[in-house]
Amino acid sequence: MPDTTTRPRPAFTTKEDFHQQARADRFEFHDYYLVDDLLEDEHRMARQAVRDWVKAEVSPIIEDAAMRGKCPTHLFKGLAEVGAFGPSLPVEYGGGGMDEIAYGVIMQELERCDSGLRSMASVQGSLVMYPIFRYASEKIKRKYLPGLGSGDLIGCFGLTEPDAGSNPGGMLTTIVDDGDAYVLNGSKMWITNSPIADLAVVWAKDEEGKVRGMVVDADTPGFSAPEIHGKWSLRASITGELVFENVRVPKENVFPDIRGLRGPLSCLSKARYGIAWGAIGAALDCYDSALRYSLEREQFGKPIGGFQLQQKKLAEMITEITKAQLLAWRLGTLANRGEATPAQISMAKRNNVMMALEIAREARQIHGGMGITNEYPIMRHLMNLETVLTYEGTHDVHLLITGHDITGINAFG
């Protein structure tokens, strides 16, 4: 490992120089157990391409976007160009043709910048492209997937409702057969990308009470997607509702062979897997900033990184990051073999997100008062991770999924 005690510290000659240095994306990757040795060349190449793009195109604008609460929608095309939409889906269907570990490291690099940026890509690839690829007819795949993969179309995923979050089976949205179409009524809540989406993958109950999935074009009469305002978290990501008032959905747009919650839950597993990797990126960014700050900030005549309590924080941070890196890598190898179970994915999502949130909190302390300013990314990551802890399955629900898996006893309900 490099001797960080001799690392040169920048000389801040002016206040403006200090601000520029603080806001610059000086991120350096940290790999204490040399987990990179377990990756293939294509994984490292994909990660580097995304890292270079993030540093050039996103890092300079992300703090301003978060402060203003504005989603930088122009980044959708850039995300497509670096292969962030459906990296592990086949190329002929708009994906990247890579494996699940490549998907993971790409999500990690995006969330290293911002959880909202990773959310934009996760929803497009895992919650929109993936169910269309897996469940739609060939005609519908060809109609939508190329545009989604290229970023020419933006999608969203409608499952959560105002009164049905952790219990998706309690959804009230319905579809009714009406001759040449289904009539869709109901509403969805907390939907990433919905106000700017061209289409939505929506889940609703049919007349028999079976959950069905479908693609709904946003320009269909009766379809609306009002934006949700006032968020303190994921401020660079746009969130809204989905409202359906007698929306006519062509029958060909309804997934023909999937019924029940197995469909939407398979999509959530795909997204949760990406989050398990992505959260490590946020943790790495907080750790990297805290380590650098501890070597630059002097008190009592020496860098604060020379004090025992700060070293304890930093040592615990890199330990937890390393454990999460190994957990994600092993999960990725299982996913490549088709052996990763939903319960294993839940464990990784829960562990890694909480790990990242705790590291963000510790990093905030190391930065002192500067940790609450947008000169550093800490507070933005901290606020974002509070949402990541809840969406795609809450922290507590994932614990119960593990409990159910190891005991065979369902504690839900």
Image: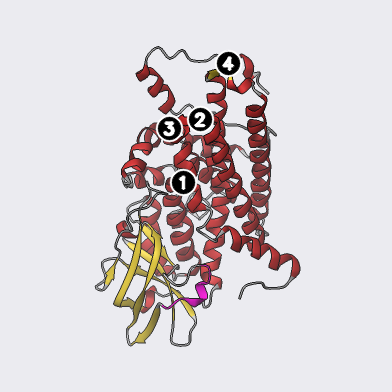
Q: Amino acid at mark 2?
A: Gly
Q: Is residue 162 magenta?
A: no
Q: Amino acid at mark 3?
A: Lys
Residue 44 picture location, percent across and down: 57, 36
Quick one: SS at disc 1?
Answer: helix
**Residue for badge 1:** 383
Quick one: SS at disc 4?
Answer: loop
Which of the two discs, 1 and 2, sits closer to the camera?
Answer: 2
**Residue for badge 4:** 300
User: At 34% from the left edge and 41% from the top edge, which residue is drawn?
Assistant: 67
In the rendered structure, are the residues bearing label 1 and label 2 in contact, judged by CB atoms less than 8 Å apart? Answer: no
Q: Which residues are magenta?
A: 166-172
Mark on residue 374?
none
**Is residue 236 found left or right of 296 in the rendered image?**
left
Residue 280 visible in the displayed image: yes
Q: Give the crowd class for mark 2: few <14, some 14-19, many >=20 residues within 10 Å.
A: few
Quick one: SS at disc 3?
Answer: helix
Q: Amino acid at mark 1?
A: Met
Q: CA distance from mark 1 to mark 3?
A: 21 Å
Q: CA distance from mark 2 to mark 3?
A: 25 Å
**Residue for badge 3:** 55
Q: Name the foreground residue: 265 vs 381.
A: 381
**Residue for badge 2:** 368
Q: Name the foreground residue: 242 vs 126.
A: 242
Image colouring? secondary structure
- Mark 1 vs 2, N-terminal side: 2
Q: Quadrant of the C terminus?
A: bottom right
- Mark 2 vs 3, N-terminal side: 3
Q: CA distance from mark 4 to mark 3?
A: 34 Å
Q: Name the foreground residue: 214 vs 5.
A: 5
